Image: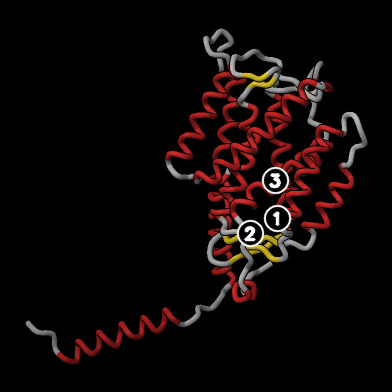
Amino acid sequence: MREPRFTAALTRSSIARVLAARKRPRPHTRGHRLAEGIAEFLIFGCKQAWACVFGGAMVALIVATHLYYPHDAYVTRYDFLFLAALTIQGILLGSRLETVEEAKVILMYHLIGTAMEVFKTEVGSWSYPEAGLFRIGGVPLFSGFMYAAIGSYIARCWRLFDFRFTRHPPIWALGLLALAIYVNFYTHHRFIDLRVALFAASAVLFGRCWVHYRIWRVHRRMPLLLGLFLVALFVWIAENLGTWTRTWTYPHQTHGWSMVRLGKLGSWFLLLVVSYTLIAAVSRPRALDQAAAGRCPG
């Protein structure tokens, strides 16, 4: 049976009204804003968890092996951590959660971190008390993956949050700063410590830079300096877990655990500048277009 003409016309009219209603802006009520805020908060948490999957897995393994790993196992705890880190990195690459270019930069940071670990353990800055086969001098090879986890986190955040920048410093200037920071980690044991000057240089280069990140629909923004400091703070917290499990120890923790000194927070901030510079050299910071900048909430 054919549909009567007036019924078909009424149906088409109803559909047209529904479509028109969908195109009209909805009233931004308090309940609507609250719902969007909750949704954006949950999305932010999920993206952050996904970005730090490598670092989070390594910290979880460090704590779990401290609590449950058998002392008489054929494979030592340090060697197990090294093999587990290799496996996790292989899964990330095989599943394309990390690109080959990102992996190359992370590997470079891994090597830079391992070289510094060898030097720092020789001068007594910290030590690794357990035995292991996969090691260079007094440094187990899994330790380099802790530096790689930082690079992995920054690279994944860059993609997941679609980073854009305003007034980003030139890469060549960041490269010079990163080189000076890395050299100072070695030379300050014998010569003057330039850390204060390096903090000042970081403030000058990053002071006017804003990073714009998209959680859901729009880009939001924050000072890049603040973002680097917050990441350094979480790395410092993770390091306290590492020393609590006696995976590595500082001289002041020889007779019992105590918190890692706050001075290490500054060291981690400077190391984050090095890591960020390596990632930025590959990802190439993109400016925020003017139309999006006008819609970007603070």
Residue at the spot x=61%, y=32% of the render?
145
Q: Quadrant of residue 170?
A: bottom right
> Which color scheme did the rendering employ for the protein?
secondary structure
Amino acid type shown at disc 1: Ile
Amino acid type shown at disc 2: Pro
Q: Secondary structure at mark 3?
A: helix
Residue 171's tag is: 1
The reply to whether callout 2 and callout 1 are in contact (CB within 8 Å) is yes
Q: Is residue 1 left or right of residue 166?
A: left
Residue ID for mark 3:
231
Residue at the spot x=30%, y=84% of the render?
14
- N-terminal label among 2 and 3: 3
**Is 25 drawn above or below residue 9 in the view shown?**
above
Mark 3: few/some/many CA within 10 Å (<14, 14-19, 20+): some
- N-terminal label among 3 and 1: 1
Distance between mark 2 and mark 3 Cα atoms:
19 Å
Mark 2: few/some/many CA within 10 Å (<14, 14-19, 20+): some
Residue ID for mark 2:
285
